[in-house]
């Protein structure tokens, strides 16, 4: 009688057992959700290094545009669907989700050097002194300027310009006949797209999202001033189709020499000065974020970090990957393989202390200064009841920020509505949401009326 497949399998198992060998264990597959930016794409290219040192682990990447990433990971973690083992999140999610028990706490291993993390970044990812994510890179906001165009136009800007000075410079440098827009700003609607910039513009004009009674303040003078300035800058001196542009789109425009001024995340400095990727390398100056009537809340604080959802059944492998990706060893690996200009910044003291990093990243000092000045526990000139600078640390903010961002985006249309009309509609929508959620108590005076 011929041996059956079952007999052959049993014979093989007995042979392996007698020889002291074992069947190969099935590899653990980690599904990682991340955003489609340059640093994350570098991490994906270098992940085989981690897999070689962890032969029982394989990493599968799900790479998404920023808005899509936020939607998918929020839906997955809220429903405990368990699609992802590692999620790329920010300080907002770390603040809100850790309090809801949606993230696994992370206690780094002894060799991780957790005390090397920048204090404000570590705090942004902690809840009650417990870390819930590890930072891949951190950022604030700065003003990028074409130094050659400024010189040609006889325009100068101080290290900490005002928004008025930036607007005047944008008007002088706007030259559509030569394919150069005076300024590029985020126009794509979303709580993490156009609203971080608009939020800090409102802050530095003396505004806030909510007063101490949780009443929205979107119809106050600071918001009107900020939103009017924002919309006029893009309509008069911005690129065509600005309402479709987020960070990546503006990075491409600036790197192609099509923007004279760009106000956005400090991480941009790592890309615009790479000669192989940018036509304007060596022609870029880095200034602090613009201010208006107050410096309070004029620069945001953000970190793209790696976290483990509570639904993951592969926490040990996930933490091993997260520690590797955010370690000093990974920084050294990127420096060796990609160069110091490609190193993720905004997370570790040791990175900024390295002379090679500073030499390759002329924006480093501006970035570190901006990060140190960003206080998400005291973000606005008037007292506010929330944590967060460009976001508000409540679960409802994702929906609120996106609705307001969509309404403000209409100001960039060819035939836009009035600013007052847009903000009145936004005020009504946000107030309705806050009442439904139980934040606003009846009888509290409406301080948004002025």
Image (spheres, rainbow, N blue to C red):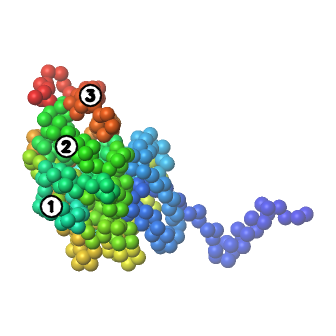
When asked about the image quadrant of residue 348, the answer is bottom left
Which disc is residue 229 wearing?
A: 2
Image location (x, y in percent) of residue 179 = 33, 57
Q: Quadrant of the N terminus?
A: bottom right
Q: Which of 68 and 439 is in front in this view?
A: 68
Closest to the camera, between mark 2 and mark 3, is 2
**Residue at position x 31%, y 40% from top?**
412
Residue shown at the point (45%, 62%) measured from the top left: 317
Give me the C-alpha separation between circle 2 and circle 1: 20 Å
| Residue extending furthest toward the right | 1
Q: Nearer the viewer, residue 86 or 147?
A: 147
**128 displayed left or right of 272:** left
Using a 10 Å C-alpha cutoff, classify the residue at mark 1 as few (fewer than 14 neighbours), some (14 to 19) or many (20 or more).
some
Dot 2 or dot 1, earlier in sequence:
1
Task: Give the residue pinned by disc 3.
Answer: 425
Say which residue appears at 35% left-offset and 50% top-offset: 246
């Amino acid at each position: 009688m011929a041996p059956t497949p079952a007999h052959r399998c049993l014979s093989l198992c007995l042979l392996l057992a007698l020889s002291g060998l074992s069947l190969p264990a099935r590899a653990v597959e980690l599904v990682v959700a991340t955003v489609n930016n340059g640093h994350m794409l570098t991490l994906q290219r270098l992940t085989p290094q981690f897999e070689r040192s962890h032969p029982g682990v394989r990493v599968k990447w799900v790479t998404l545009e920023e808005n899509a990433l936020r939607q998918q990971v929020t839906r997955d973690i809220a429903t405990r669907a368990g699609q992802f083992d590692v999620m790329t999140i920010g300080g907002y999610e770390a603040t809100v989700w850790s309090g809801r028990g949606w993230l696994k706490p992370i206690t780094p291993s002894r060799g991780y050097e957790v005390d090397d993390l920048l204090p404000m970044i570590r705090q942004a990812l902690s809840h009650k002194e417990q870390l819930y994510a590890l930072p891949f890179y951190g950022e604030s906001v700065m003003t990028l300027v074409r130094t050659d165009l400024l010189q040609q136009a006889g325009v100068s800007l101080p290290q900490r310009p005002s928004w008025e000075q930036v607007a005047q410079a944008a008007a002088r440098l706007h030259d559509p006949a030569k394919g150069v827009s005076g300024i590029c700003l985020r126009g794509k609607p979303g709580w993490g797209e156009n609203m971080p910039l608009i939020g800090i513009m409102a802050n530095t004009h003396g505004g806030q999202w909510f007063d101490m009674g949780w009443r929205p303040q979107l119809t106050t003078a600071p918001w009107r001033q900020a939103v009017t300035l924002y919309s006029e800058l893009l309509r008069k001196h911005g690129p065509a189709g600005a309402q479709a542009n987020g960070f990546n789109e503006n990075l491409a425009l600036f790197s192609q020499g099509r923007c004279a001024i760009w106000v956005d995340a400090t991480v941009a400095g790592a890309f615009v000065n790479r000669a192989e990727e940018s036509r304007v390398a060596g022609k870029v100056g880095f200034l602090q974020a613009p201010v208006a009537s107050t410096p309070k809340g004029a620069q945001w604080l953000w970190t793209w970090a790696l976290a483990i959802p509570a639904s993951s059944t592969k926490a040990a492998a996930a933490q091993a990957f997260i520690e590797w990706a955010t370690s000093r060893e990974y920084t050294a690996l990127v420096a060796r393989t990609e160069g110091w200009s490609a190193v993720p910044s905004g997370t570790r003291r040791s990175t900024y202390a390295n002379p090679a990093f500073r030499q390759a990243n002329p924006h480093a000092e501006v970035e570190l200064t901006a990060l140190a000045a960003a206080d998400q526990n005291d973000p606005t000139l008037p007292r506010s009841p929330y944590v967060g600078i460009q976001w508000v640390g409540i679960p409802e903010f994702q929906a609120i920020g996106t609705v307001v961002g969509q309404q403000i985006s209409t100001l960039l249309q060819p035939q836009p509505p009035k600013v007052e009309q847009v903000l009145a509609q936004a005020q009504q929508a946000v107030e309705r949401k806050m009442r439904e959620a139980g934040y606003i108590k009846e009888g509290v005076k409406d301080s948004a009326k002025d």
